[in-house]
């Protein structure tokens, strides 16, 4: 029988003796050293031992150490203790045990037979998922004797639990960790694992999920969904790139299915420019892969965004006015449904699902492959302009006129914030789909005249170079923190009244980041009923971000009467009314019908939930 075995060191030992015994235990292959709570300042001693050893776990009870009572003169508050613990985990790995229930103390002089005897009080605890066992020791000889028990109990390595007690102690309640499907065990990440820090959060949102599953194939996605079905009381996040402003691909204490390993990009029909893309790829990777062919797929404005989230929501980007939204390029999708089955959806095969995935895809399943049609795109003009304008209201109005009247090969977005002394700073960035320098300058000159040009960068580049400005995330992951606060809206025209109210909103300081994404052109040429994104007549998508939710809400209220619809990718308010804003009554009713067919138990509910048993007025609806 293989168990986690360690020693409990008595109080009163000199620090150098504690260190000598801890190192002796580590050399002997033991798993754990537990400090007596009666020792002087056991927390500090535990920290010192962690820094002086390499792999062995150190156990010390926080409450016994007098740190859970903020009123205690020498105690620490729970928040300080938890932060200290997080820092230790980052510096030394998850080797600190602070919950005394993670181990059981055997009698001094315990033998292998006594530990495994059916009459032993520890015998029921010796499973791989159970508690560690520690035997009191005060000398090197006693430590060596305990280490000698390892061979009789199964050896120190081959049969040891996959995760040590210090990691298991950080598991979140309600998750059957020992029942993770065998296909997913190797890639699963728990809170105590070294790689957890790189998968817990998203670009803007801090997270602390209880388990991150990382499937590599559709079959493994099905296994992950099956595991999630057994935990329907927990939040479930689906993540591709983790960049989404809403931050819905992480959670607190729930499950995240991370699709980053499913990032294959392949050309399946060169003559038709058809490309098959995994959900975990980023758009900069897609752009690089298609550059060899002289192709591109419009994909927002930032190459670090994952394919999965954007290609199921809409995709308003630099090429949208010329070629349409990203979802307008979709030819087919493969989806693992809530029941674990893999289906293909096209205009003729499961057409209702294909309609719904294009705009509201997060609600119906996990897309494991996208087939899209690329367009021929050669060199482009990439522009970044920074201007100072004395009158923001006038500048917004003029920008609206210039942006909407520009040829559809030109797409420019605007970003600004609260006014500064001496004027407002606006940043313009976008793309001219032309390789002719004179054409590029001609297209951009009207924008440059909006104010005093203080900085500019206009270059002739490949589309892949534009997308490649986003840095690689890497294995260290995203490190968002807190909750993002963002609102979205769509407007049919940038009117003088809108410009006035937008400028007034920015003067309140409640909105720190304000963006206008220019739409129109090819977007408007698609029938509103063709996809689940119905707002084809919008001229601009409007986004506002703020650091304080209450201040953001109050400021944004001044714009709501101008807005007609919203784009969920830039919205964090999960109120059901936002769904009606995003889809409209007719589309939302149709989406609920599709939801009842493909996800009647509402497994996929954490990303702007289209609840199956309610209609667009949020009234109860009969089950399908």
Image (cartoon, grey):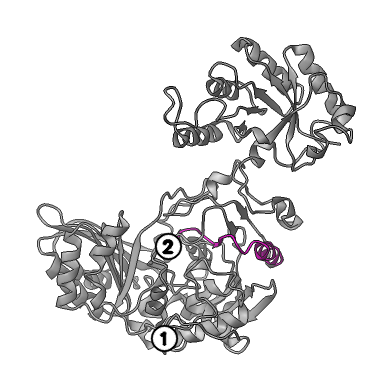
- Residue at the (76%, 17%) spot, across then down: 143
Q: State the image coordinates of residue 490 (x, y, percent, origin top left).
A: 31, 76
Mark 1 Cα shell of 10 Å, populated few (<14), some (14-19), many (≥20): some
- Residue at the (72%, 55%) spot, across then down: 180
Does 530 appear above or below 322? Answer: below
Horizontal arrangement in the rendering, residue 231 relative to residue 578 (left or right): right
Horizontal arrangement in the rendering, residue 178 relative to residue 96 (left or right): right
Where is residue 387, by image quadrant?
bottom left
The one of 442 and 17 positioned closer to us in this rendering: 17
- Residue at the (41%, 64%) spot, across then down: 462
* Quarter of the figure with the N terminus: top right
Q: For numbered disc 1, what is the local secondary structure? A: helix
Where is residue 54, by image quadrant?
top right
Which mark is drawn over residue 585?
1
Reading the image, the residue beneath label 2 is 246
The one of 79 and 558 positioned closer to us in this rendering: 79
Q: State the image coordinates of residue 57 (x, y, percent, origin top left).
A: 66, 29
């Amino acid at each position: 029988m293989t168990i986690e075995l360690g020693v409990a060191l008595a109080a009163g030992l000199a620090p150098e003796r504690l260190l000598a015994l801890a190192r002796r235990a580590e050399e002997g292959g033991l798993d754990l050293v537990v400090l007596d709570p009666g020792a002087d300042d056991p927390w500090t001693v535990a920290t010192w031992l962690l820094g002086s050893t390499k792999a062995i776990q150190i156990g010390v009870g926080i409450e016994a150490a007098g740190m859970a009572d903020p009123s205690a003169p020498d105690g620490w508050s729970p928040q300080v203790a938890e932060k200290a613990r997080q820092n230790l985990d980052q510096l030394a790995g998850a080797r600190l045990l602070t919950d005394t229930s993670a181990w059981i103390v055997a009698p001094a002089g315990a033998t292998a037979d006594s530990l495994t005897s059916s009459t032993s009080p520890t015998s029921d605890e010796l499973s791989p998922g159970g508690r560690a066992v520690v035997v009191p020791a005060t000398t090197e000889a006693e430590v060596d004797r305990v280490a000698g028990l390892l061979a009789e109990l199964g050896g120190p390595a081959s049969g040891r639990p996959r995760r040590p007690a210090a990691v298991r102690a950080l598991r979140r309640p309600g998750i059957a960790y020992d029942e993770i499907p065998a296909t997913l065990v190797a890639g699963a990440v728990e809170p105590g694992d070294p790689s957890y820090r790189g998968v817990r959060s998203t670009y803007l949102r801090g997270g602390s999920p209880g388990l991150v599953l990382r499937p590599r194939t559709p079959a493994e996605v099905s296994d992950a969904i099956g595991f999630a079905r057994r935990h329907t009381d927990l939040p479930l996040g689906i993540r591709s790139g983790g960049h989404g402003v809403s931050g819905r691909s992480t959670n607190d204490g729930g499950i995240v299915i991370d699709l980053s390993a499913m990032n294959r990009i392949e050309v399946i029909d060169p003559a038709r420019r058809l490309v098959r893309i995994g959900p975990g790829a980023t758009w900069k990777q897609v752009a690089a892969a298609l550059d060899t062919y002289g192709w591109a797929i419009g994909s927002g404005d930032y190459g670090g965004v994952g394919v999965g989230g954007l290609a199921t929501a809409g995709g308003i980007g630099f090429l949208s006015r010329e070629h349409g939204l990203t979802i307008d390029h979709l030819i087919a999708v493969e989806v693992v449904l809530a029941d674990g089955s893999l289906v293909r959806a096209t205009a003729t095969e499961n057409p209702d699902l294909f309609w719904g995935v294009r705009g509201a895809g997060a609600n119906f399943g996990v897309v494991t492959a996208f087939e899209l049609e690329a367009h021929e795109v050669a060199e482009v003009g990439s522009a970044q302009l920074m201007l100072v304008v004395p009158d923001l209201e006038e500048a917004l109005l003029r920008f609206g006129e210039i942006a909407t009247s520009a040829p559809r090969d030109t797409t420019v977005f605007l970003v600004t914030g609260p006014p500064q002394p001496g004027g407002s700073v606006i940043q313009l960035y976008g793309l001219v789909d032309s390789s002719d320098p004179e054409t590029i300058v001609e297209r951009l000159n009207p924008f440059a005249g909006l104010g005093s040009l203080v900085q500019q960068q206009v270059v002739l580049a490949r589309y892949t170079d534009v997308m490649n400005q986003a840095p690689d995330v890497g294995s260290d992951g995203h490190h968002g923190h807190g909750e993002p606060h963002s609102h979205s809206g769509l407007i049919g025209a940038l009117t003088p009244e809108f410009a006035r109210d937008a400028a007034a909103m920015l003067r309140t300081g409640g909105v720190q980041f304000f963006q206008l994404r220019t739409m129109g052109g090819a977007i408007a040429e698609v029938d509103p009923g063709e996809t689940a994104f119905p707002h084809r007549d919008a001229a601009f998508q409007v986004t506002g971000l703020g650091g304080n939710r209450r201040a953001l809400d109050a400021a944004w209220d001044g714009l709501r009467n101008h807005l007609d619809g919203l784009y969920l990718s830039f919205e964090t308010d999960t109120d059901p009314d936002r769904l009606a804003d995003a889809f409209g009554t007719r589309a939302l009713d149709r989406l609920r019908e599709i939801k009842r067919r493909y996800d009647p138990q509402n497994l996929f509910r954490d990303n702007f939930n289209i609840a199956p048993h309610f209609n667009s007025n949020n009234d109860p609806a009969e089950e399908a």
